[in-house]
Amino acid sequence: MLQNTYQWLMRLSASPNAPLALAAVSFAESSFFPIPPDVMLVPMVLADRTKAWRYAAIATVSSVIGGLAGYAIGYFLLEAVGKPILAFYGKTDSLVTFSKAFADYGFWILLTKGMTPIPYKVLTIAAGVAQMNLGVFVGASIIARSMRFFLVAGLLYFFGDRIREFIEKRLILVTSVIAVSVIGGFVALKLFL
């Protein structure tokens, strides 16, 4: 089923409705859908690199709005909707620990893990369960998701098809290096200012 959905999204990324579909997939991936928006973002940017920033913005805004839906699932619908989604990813058992971590370090968790291909919906649902401050949640989500999607769009914009294979194989490594750099920068600023 996942392979069929992936193929369907690849075909959709070449259609005239691709930006709307990118928005829908980005929204859904942040709350319940199992396939990341990169499946559409990558071929869309490669098809027209002049629209790379527009596509990254669509993915970012839609992902943050979808993140709010995931937050609402964790906050209001944990038993009915949240737990089945978390069970799909094998995260039900770690929900209590994860939610406790969110209460103390939610901003940093969202900032670092929200940039990676880790299922963002797990983070958004856990943030809702922890009743994380909504302003902090939205702020961290905007930073993390924009860094993620603008990084992919930027690499594709500047390097084109040559970088696609590298991104697809090593996206976790690339985003992790950037996350460590960003956190290191914040820590350095805090220590030296």
Image (cartoon, rainbow, N blue to C red):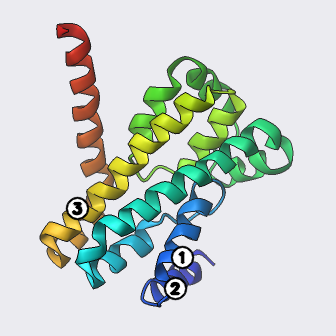
Quadrant showing the N terminus: bottom right
- Specify the amino acid type for callout 1: Leu
Query: Marks 3/1: CA distance?
Result: 21 Å
Give how far apart the Cα atoms at labels 2 and 3 are.
22 Å
State which mark lies toward you, 3 or 1.
1
Image location (x, y in percent) of residue 73:
75, 45
Q: Position of residue 61 (x, y in %)?
A: 49, 56
- Quick one: 154 or 181, which is closer to the camera? 154
The answer to whether mark 1 and mark 2 are in CB contact below 8 A is yes
Q: Residue at x 26, y 18 (%)?
A: 187
Q: What label does residue 154 carry, if any?
A: 3
**Res 166 seen here:** no
User: According to the image, label 1 marks what residue?
Assistant: 20
Q: Indicate whether 81 appears above or below 8.
A: above
Residue bearing the label numbered 2: 17
Q: Amino acid at mark 2?
A: Asn
